[in-house]
Amino acid sequence: MKAILMARPEKGGIEFTEKAEVPKPGFREVLIRVKATGMCGTDRHIYDWDPSIRDMVKPPMIFGHEFCGEIAELGKETNGSLKVGDFVSCEMHEVCGRCYQCRTGQGHLCPNTAIYGVHKPGCFAEYVKVPASNVIHLPKNLPIKVGAFLDALGNAVHTAMATEIPGRNIAITGYGPIGAMAAAVVEFCGAGSITIADVNPLALERAESWKKSLPSRRKPESIRIVSMNANDRETSMRRTVEETNGGVDAVLEMSGAEKAINDGLRFTRNGGEVVLLGLPSGRGINLENYKQDIIFRGIKLHGIIGRKMYDTWYRMLALLGAGLQIEHVVTTESSFADCEEAFHLFSQGKTLKVVMYPNGK
């Protein structure tokens, strides 16, 4: 079968092959024929061979963990609700089911989690083998372009739902793919105002384009697009704090960039919260003023990983069913054979979401 491997432990060490072995589903496993797959920030970290991810991945290995497809084959003793031909996706975090977190409804925090596409072979392939218990049925009318990145949309929904949205001032630091999804989610869920902050002119341009596309019910002044580059940072910070009456209620930090995290702390009102999803390229960051920006101002920090299993999936599908528009985040579509060019664009920040198809669109 066709597949994309992280073939070598080095930056850009990927390889397209047509000779990968089709996996065989075992006990309580399902084989899924991949229709479309999304490129995630984690995949970029793998492609760039960042220190934050390299200890988890053992090349050569098929990576990727966002996809949709059809069930091709059922292993023994699979869930009776699953049938060959079903349109599905999958929660690609496999948890132990035995630890404290799993037994108290916090399976997404399981310390024994194995991630398909990171620790185990993933979905950048024509076929992927997954646990039957993790399979999620999708609506038949859901575009496969959207089904390809539900894993990432789930991250955006999980991050947004970690705080209260309706009628509150929300800031998003980092208008990459998941930042763009989060902006759409908080707008759809009734945020009083939205501040989108980035340093990349292309990201800011995309945010402005999204803002212009919104329904007329949303007043343009309720969405601020602010540049945080060196020349604009202090002015943008001061104006945002003034215009939100002392700072935003919550920041959704999507970039993992050190400056963005520090900016987010300063954006936030006293007693506000910063919800952290973005991963830094290294193992740690420096806080500019820990005492003043967190302790003395009573800021709450909330780390986010993955999606709640499976609450977030049902919420996400319900939002899409209610009319959440998200297709605009896909700015590049590619075949597996052209994966190197797609990865280069993604790594350079020249595109938002990349969706790849095993045999072309």
Image (tube, grey):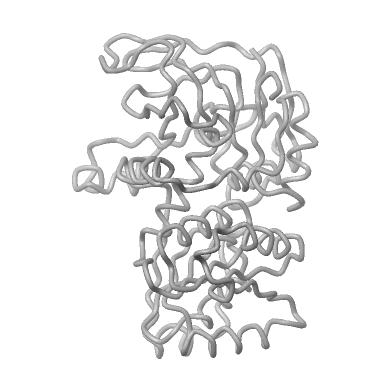
Percent across and percent down for residue 189 are: 40, 59
Is residue 127 placed above or below 323 in the rendered structure? Answer: above
Residue 197, quarter of the rendered image: bottom right
| Residue at image point 52% right, 70% down | 194
12 sits to left or right of 311:
right
Q: Is residue 298 above or below residue 54?
A: below
Q: Nearer the viewer, residue 5 or 33?
A: 33
Q: Quadrant of the N terminus?
A: top right
- Residue 275 % position (x, y): 44, 66
x, y percent for residue 95? 33, 37
- Residue projecting furthest to the left: 104
- Left of 95 or right of it: where is 342? right
Q: Where residue 224 sits: x, y (%)? A: 60, 74
Give residue 302's quadrant in the image. bottom left
Q: Return the residue nearer the eye: 21 or 141.
A: 141
- Does 312 sit left or right of 244 as displayed? left
The one of 217 and 337 positioned closer to us in this rendering: 217
Residue in the foreground of this view, choosing between 40 and 184: 184
Q: Residue at x 51, y 45 (%)?
A: 152
